[in-house]
Image (tube, helix red, strand yellow):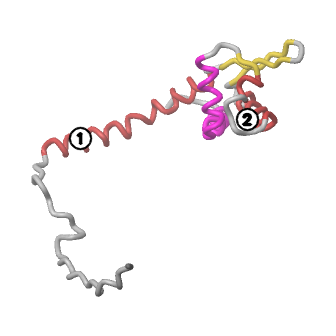
Amino acid sequence: MVNFSAATLDRTFAALSDPTRRALLARLGVEDAVSVSELARPFAISLPAVMKHLDVLAEAGLVDRAKAGRTVTCRLNAGPMEDAMAWLRFYERFWTEKLDRLAALLETTPWPENPPSPSTAGSRRRPRRSTKPGPTRP
């Protein structure tokens, strides 16, 4: 197995676990340097909430921040994600083997054209019980 720092992987996966943080990283992946206020604009959360998300991303090493005057710009740093991908690649063989076996089974197993549903195979339809029509309005 490849050796990885548990603390680094924990921070990376924790940072990636939140959809808002993933959206921030996706935006930074498209644009080179974006100000914090520009990053916050499309979200329905406050600027301080976005800044807390950016703090988590920066602690994980996924975002680099630079301040010029009153403007703070952020850039993506994909290095920690590369480490996480390498860690996942090590375990990929386990699910790949199982999926390959499942695909082989599905390709060799004959399936009936329209199999009966297990929930309705032994049941009969009940007769409808309708009530008398109500009075009609003039």
Q: Position of residue 131 (x, y in %)?
A: 30, 86
The residue sitting at 81% across, 19% down in the picture is: 72
Q: Position of residue 44 (x, y in %)?
A: 70, 38
Q: Which residue is mark 2?
A: 53
The residues tagged by marks 2 and 1 sit, at their Cα atoms, a distance apart of 40 Å
Q: Residue at x 46, y 32 (%)?
A: 90
> Nearer the observer, disc 2 or disc 1?
2
- Give the residue type at disc 2: His
- Name the residue located 70 percent from the left edge and 14 percent from the top edge: 33
Q: Residues within 10 Å of mark 1 (few under 14, many from 20)?
A: few
| Residue 65 rendering spot, x and y as whole percentages | 77, 20
Image location of residue 71, percent across then percent down? 83, 17
- Label pair 2/1, CB-CB below 8 angstroms: no
Q: Which residues are magenta?
A: 7-30
Amino acid type, label 1: Ala
Relative to 51, say whether 28 is above or below: above
> Which quadrant of the structure image shows residue 119?
bottom left
Q: Nearer the viewer, residue 73 or 46?
A: 46
Residue under pointer 1: 103
Any magenta on residue 9? yes
Would you say residue 7 is visible in this rendering? no
41 left or right, relative to 109? right
- Residue 52 visible? The answer is yes
Q: Quadrant of the C terminus?
A: bottom left
Number of residues whose C-alpha sits closer than 10 Å to that of mark 2, classed few (under 14), some (14–19) or many (20 or more):
some
**Comes first in the chain, label 2 or label 1:** 2
Residue 18, quarter of the rendered image: top right
In the rendered image, residue 47 lying in the magenta stretch gets the answer: no
Residue nearer the viewer, 134 or 93: 134
Magenta span: chief secondary structure:
helix
Snapshot quadrant of residue 67: top right
Q: Is 5 in front, or is 19? A: 19
